[in-house]
Amino acid sequence: MANESKRTAGQTAFRLALLGACLLAAWATFDGWSWSLPRLTTTGCEEEALFPIWKFARHGTVYADPQSVPFSVSYYNWLFFFVYGGTVKVLFALFSLDDSVLPVITRLLTLGFAGASIGIIYAILGRLSVLAISGSRLVRLTCSVFLILSALAGSWLYTARPDMAAITCELLGLWCALRYADTRRISLLLAAVLACYAAWSFKQNFVHVLGGLFVFLMLSRQWRELGLVLLSFVVLAGGTLLVGGHAYRHSLIGAQMNCQVSFAVSLEIFLAAARLAPQLVAVAVALAAALVIRKRWPKSTAGDLLAGTALVALGIGFLGAAKQGADTNYFIPASVFGVLWGFNLFTSGSEKSFTPSGVPFFFRWAILATFCLAVVMGLGAPARKAVKEVARLLGRDETNGNELASGIGREVAQLKQHLDELPGPVFVTDRACNLPWVQRKAPHFVYSFMYAVDRKAGYTFESGGIGGLIEKGYFETIVVLQRGCACETPGLAPSRCVHVSMGHLPLVQDGAVPSIDGGRLTHYRLAFQDGAFTYYRKQP
């Protein structure tokens, strides 16, 4: 009787701990979103997503020529702008909202997609009938929460970017594909392809589940179904590229042709991602082992599908992270699909194939253990912050964790006030400060991340680019940010970044007359300085 009471008490304590962990993760995510409110950007180059969303909402051209004024580019696929821009457009029309509300709406949308991903993972785990999970809905929910609300996801949970929306579509496609693997219903296979197409339509590198489906169909020698999947996706994606036009195709395919590619950098980013999500290492090693000893590996239709998806996601992660400007977000899909594959190693259908001395036994527990380690590591920072917040509310700590973000908000507000009073056209060297709710005078020079690289590669820009426009005295006002930012990444704590945003063209002290982008400020005089910004006016 006493043992039964102890066991019941232990189970209750365990459930309370899981519930508390979920609530802490949810609070940390909401706290991060609150931190994002006064900031211009939350993740590097977010302005290049916000600006075309604004253009869509205001009936502008989303896919414009990046070599024409104002040298902007829209890198993401059409469904991202249709969903995010369409939502903003409807809300703007219904409530007559100011443009400055756009980041709040779009970041909330990303949070909504993150919540939808949690729900779909919960359904997938139930579909897999995982022994250690299916017995408790709370444990299933906890696993679902921490696969999405993770330290690796970080700021990508509340940024105006398509990653969370794309992974939501991929998870839906995976759910359909798993059901097809069990039932062989063609309608479910086509539904999986449609979901994968939607993921691609949000962000074009999200073809992880599609690739996993290819691997699964090849391994199971379902050639007719493989042809159907290939033909369906080629028709959908190829038709979209054909109908989209030249500017659309250039934005998706050609706009980043001059990006430097370094696999040494890719490995560094993988290691940085692994510090946030240690399960990535276990997944990578287990997948390599599964390839080497494939004949000894337990057979499972769901396992083959998940293993193929995780393998493709890991490969695409390394390829994407090798690109200039990449970050740890490229490994978020690999962490999610890899852990789902690890969970599947516990399913009842293949349990007899696993022996305590076997290789799979080691890897399944390695994946689970490192995932649990990642959860504990990820909860450390929000737990410490929660303690400080409680202490502050109790009057024992007067520090304000959002002081830096509030300071940035004040600087941007001061900049906006000055820009409202100064004549246009206006150019601010920091790209994000040219967003329409900060700099209200068209054109808005939210210039491409690739602008300087393309200039160096010899591309020809209208009027000689920004430097040429400066030489000709095109701008009435030029504002220079006196500090740059290369530290605003999801891998760092938000409070450590004291800069406004990531992209900027520096002012070069070239003799007596400074220059920007090779354009000497001959036609301009120094007007005044306020905070981090220096203001130049065109001479009469």
Image: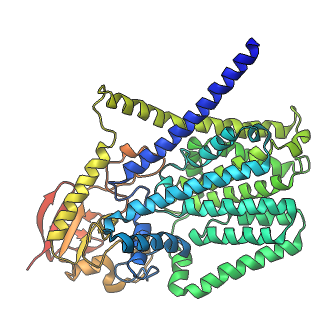
Locate residue 203, reporting x and y percent: 57, 68
Query: Which residue is at 77% across, 79% downward?
Result: 231
Q: Closer to the camera, 360 or 161? A: 161
Confirm whether residue 445 shows in the render: yes
Confirm whether residue 451 shows in the render: no
Residue 415 sits in which quadrant? bottom left
Count up the numbered dots. Answer: 0
Give the vertical position of 396 relative to 522 (above or below): above
Q: Closer to the camera, 41 or 147? A: 147
Q: Closer to the camera, 480 or 353? A: 353
The residue positioned farthest toward the left in the image shown? 540
Query: Which residue is at 77% across, 58% downward?
Result: 308
Q: Is residue 13 left or right of residue 192?
A: left
Q: Closer to the camera, 403 or 488? A: 403
Q: Is residue 177 left or right of residue 497?
A: right
Q: Quadrant of the N terminus?
A: top right
Query: Which residue is at 68% across, 38% downward?
Result: 139
Residue 436 sits in which quadrant? bottom left
Residue 177 sits in which quadrant? bottom right
Locate residue 240, reporting x and y percent: 62, 82
Q: Quadrant of the C terminus?
A: bottom left
Locate residue 121, reporting x and y percent: 67, 52
Q: Is residue 204 left or right of residue 192?
A: left
Locate residue 82, reporting x and y percent: 51, 75
Give the vertical position of 31 relative to 529 (above or below): above
User: Please, which colouring scheme is shown?
Assistant: rainbow
